[in-house]
Amino acid sequence: MRAACLRALGPALPRQPFAALSSAARRGRKKLDPAAARVAQEAHLQEALRLVRACAVRGYDEGVSVDVHLNVDAKRTEERVRGQVMLPHGQGKTVRVAVFARGADADAARAAGADLVGAEELVAEVVAGRLDFDRVLATPDALPALAKAARVLGPKGLMPNPKRGTVVTEVAAAVQQAKAGQVEFRAQNQGVVMVGLGKVSFGADRLADNAPTAAIAALAAVLGARPDRFRGKPVHRITLSSTNGPGIDLDHFLW
């Protein structure tokens, strides 16, 4: 795969194409104003995407993702990072949404396009092993019934939680956002957050329009979700890659 990348990009591909400046030089750079920083970020991501697409040489449609290596210890409760971000064109896959609700809320969920809607009867199906969905939403009044499925949904990261925004009162809006491309993220034990940005098959133009905006939005959401004592401090590393391609290091001091 490395050889295929070299053939596609030419012999001058550096080992770390964005590590042109030393740490000392980076620390000495002046901080850009917000407008200039946004321009620099987009240009930076455009070049990274060119490398990622050239290295996606497998015989199937690879995904493109950004990995943010945070300077937090996710094993400590007060340093856990999680949140949501809206991607302009989604991730290139169909999202199946299950909603635990009753009455008018259940009707609103069906009208908004939820794939599975119910209360006690849907809980019984989940406990029995039904897991053909990607996102789970619940209304506050359905939580007591849903508690029976906590042992099934919890280990898979699907159990609704108010802190994650998956316990909702505006059911229709929440379902539409989940179907339209709202993505949940959380830091793994090593403090790494991975956010999928789309597919290589989006094409050069569509991926070029989608990924920079999505990556910047995802990075802003991830960095904004860090505990207060880590705000303003640079992350350890940011990489952009396809499913089986090499990680392209970004200049994390731009963020």
Image (cartoon, rainbow, N blue to C red):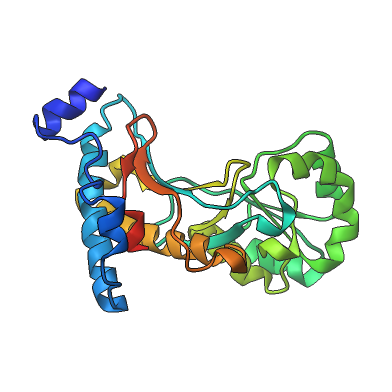
How many numbered circles does the render carry?
0
Q: Confirm whether residue 197 shows in the render.
A: no
Q: Confirm whether residue 235 shows in the render.
A: yes
Closer-to-camera residue (103/87): 87
Horizontal and vertical percent position of residue 159:
75, 51
Closer-to-camera residue (102/83): 83
Q: Quadrant of residue 109?
A: bottom right
Task: Please give left or right for residue 113 compared with residue 237 in the image.
Answer: right
Closer-to-camera residue (100/235): 235
Residue at position x 34%, y 59% in the image: 253
Q: Quadrant of residue 13?
A: top left
The quadrant the N terminus occupies is top left
Horizontal and vertical percent position of residue 116:
69, 51
Horizontal and vertical percent position of residue 166:
69, 61
The quadrant the C terminus occupies is bottom left
In the figure, 201 relative to 244: above or below?
below
Closer-to-camera residue (202/73): 73
Horizontal and vertical percent position of residue 136:
69, 53
Q: Quadrant of residue 11?
A: top left
In the figure, 192 relative to 45: above or below?
above
Task: Please give left or right for residue 79 compared with residue 219 in the image.
Answer: right
Residue at position x 26%, y 66% in the image: 29
